[in-house]
Every structure is written in C-alpha cells, then in structure tokens.
C-alpha cells in the first residue's frame, strides 16, 4: 500500500448545541491541529434527546469553509437519498471554491429511518439505498466535470460503509477514501475484499483508496495496530454541547510524535 501521512480528524456532531457552540468547537479543533473536520448529514440527534437541538450539514459546511483556513472539511457522510445528485455535486463544487479547495465529498447510502420519514423521503430498503448510491456516482462526477468554474481540485470522494458485495464495489469504482465504520478485524478483512473488487474493476485500490476509521482507545496501542492494517485517517466523534477535544488532542500528539 502506498505510504500516506497519518491524519487525524474530528467529527463535530451537530446536536444538542447552539450554533455558537459548534462554531467555537470548529475553531478549537483547527487550533488543536486536526487535519479534517467533519459533521454528519442527519436531521435529528443520534444520541440523547431524540428531539434535541440539531442543524443541517451542508449549509453548515458553507459556513465552515469561510470560518476555517487550513483544515479539510466534509460530512461523514452525506446521505445520498436526501438531495438530487446533480444538485449535491454543485453544492460540493461551490463549497470547494468557498474553502479554497478543502472539501472532502463524503457519501453514504443512508440508514436513519427517522430522517427519511420526517422529511418525506422514501426510505426503501438497504438494497435500494445502495443502488441509489451506485446510480448517483456517475451523475455526481459528470456534474462536477461540467461546472463553471470547475472545482479548484479533483474533489476527494469518501464513501462510508462496509457491505462486501455492493458497497465495497462502489468504493472500488469511485472512492478516494473508504471509511470502514468498523473495528480492526473488520478493517483487515474488508480491506482485502475491497482490493479484490479493485482488481475486478481495474483500480489499484491498495494504492489509490485511503483507509479511514473511527479512532477509539489508545493511539499508541489501538492506533498503531490500525496503522499496521493500513489505516491512515483517524476520526474522533465529539458531541455537544461541550465538544470536549481532550482525546482529539491526544491523537494529534500521537500523530506528531510519529514524525
């Protein structure tokens, strides 16, 4: 696998906080030295009070693009069923320009049924949602290519999920980053399956697709084991209203100590 720099991300979960608290957390995260700041694409909290405070992802990314200077930004991940794929691509192109080329386009098939039901989207089945993701990818790429002005760079596409037959095939065909949503054994086994799909579609996914994981436990122990398995992007989730970055700073220090 191509050697990549170790990167640390933080997911500022946009729940249970006023927006001023989210804005402050983003500033603190960039100051702490993280490489990427993510939110998520949901309409209701995933933890705590299910009817608690919550904010929409993509309008927030536009604000983050102006607010930040160095970090990459993105949603971990955008539910493909919530927006027309061409519109989503043009939103991504716009945020890419606002940020000066720092957007990661995170995509996923979607899973949180409440989002769909309350906002009037068809939930369908896991299979139909994955099919929608597969169908959206060529449209997204074509719309990005047609935009005027063109994106400032080839916007990295992150795809999250681990379905071995369908999702990893989509990752192999289209993604620059794969977020595994799994532990070390999951990363190891599914990374190998991803590379099998890559061989089938003619992409060297070991070299071309960065492995992204949730950072849990000790960076010196768990982090090193994940690095050995091929992971290079480690993201920690932090929840409102406090957005405690203590553990995030530990992972940043580990990254820096590795050199």
Image (cartoon, rainbow, N blue to C red):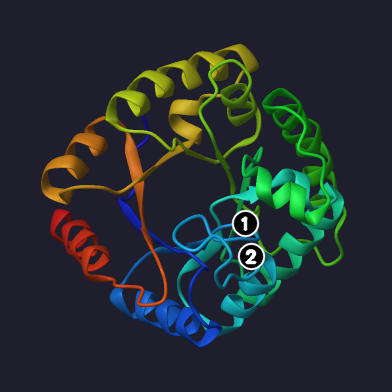
Judging depth in this view, the residue of 200 and 219 nearest the camera is 219
Give the CA distance from mark 1 to mark 2.
Answer: 5 Å
Judging depth in this view, the residue of 141 and 244 nearest the camera is 244
Residue located at (58% from left, 50% from top):
77
Judging depth in this view, the residue of 115 and 71 nearest the camera is 115
Residue located at (42% from left, 72% from top):
240
Q: Is residue 67 shown left or right of residue 134?
A: left
Position in image of residue 89 (x %, y %) = 78, 54
Q: Which residue is mark 1?
A: 41
Position in image of residue 241 (x %, y %) = 41, 76
Q: Which residue is mark 2?
A: 57
For the N terminus, the quadrant is: top left
Judging depth in this view, the residue of 9 and 100 nearest the camera is 9
The quarter holding residue 199 reads top right
Label 1 crowd (10 A; few <14 / some 14-19 / many >=20): many
Residue located at (62% from left, 44% from top):
112
- Res 215 label: none
* N-terminal-most mark, 1 or 2: 1
For the C terminus, the quadrant is: bottom left
Instruction: Give the number of marks.
Output: 2
Task: Identify the element where label 1 is drawn.
Answer: loop
Position in image of residue 15 (x %, y %) = 51, 68
* Pointers 1 and 2 in contact (C-beta within 8 Å): yes
The quarter holding residue 198 reads top right
Position in image of residue 143 (x %, y %) = 85, 50
């Amino acid at each position: 696998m191509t050697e990549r720099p170790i990167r640390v991300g933080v997911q500022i979960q946009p729940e249970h906080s006023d927006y001023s608290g989210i804005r402050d957390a983003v500033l603190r995260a960039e100051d702490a030295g993280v490489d990427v700041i993510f939110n998520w694409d949901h309409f209701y909290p995933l933890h705590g009070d299910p009817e608690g405070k919550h904010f929409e992802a993509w309008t927030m990314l536009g604000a983050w693009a102006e607010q930040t200077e160095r970090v990459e930004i993105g949603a971990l991940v955008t539910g493909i069923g919530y927006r027309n794929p061409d519109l989503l691509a043009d939103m991504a192109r716009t945020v890419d320009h606002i940020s000066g080329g720092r957007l990661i386009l995170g995509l996923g098939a979607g899973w949180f049924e409440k989002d769909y039901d309350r906002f009037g989207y068809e939930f369908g089945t896991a299979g139909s949602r994955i099919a929608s993701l597969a169908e959206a990818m060529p449209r997204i790429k074509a719309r990005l290519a047609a935009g005027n002005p063109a994106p400032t760079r080839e916007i990295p596409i992150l795809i999250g999920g681990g379905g071995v037959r369908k999702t990893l095939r989509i990752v192999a065909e289209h993604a620059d980053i794969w977020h595994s949503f799994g532990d070390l054994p999951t990363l190891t086994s599914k990374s190998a399956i991803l590379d099998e799909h890559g061989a089938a579609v003619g992409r060297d996914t070991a070299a071309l697709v960065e492995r992204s994981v949730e950072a849990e436990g000790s960076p010196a122990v768990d982090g090193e084991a994940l690095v050995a398995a091929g992971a290079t992007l480690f993201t920690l989730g932090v929840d409102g209203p406090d957005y405690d970055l203590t553990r995030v700073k530990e992972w940043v220090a580990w990254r820096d100590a590795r050199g």
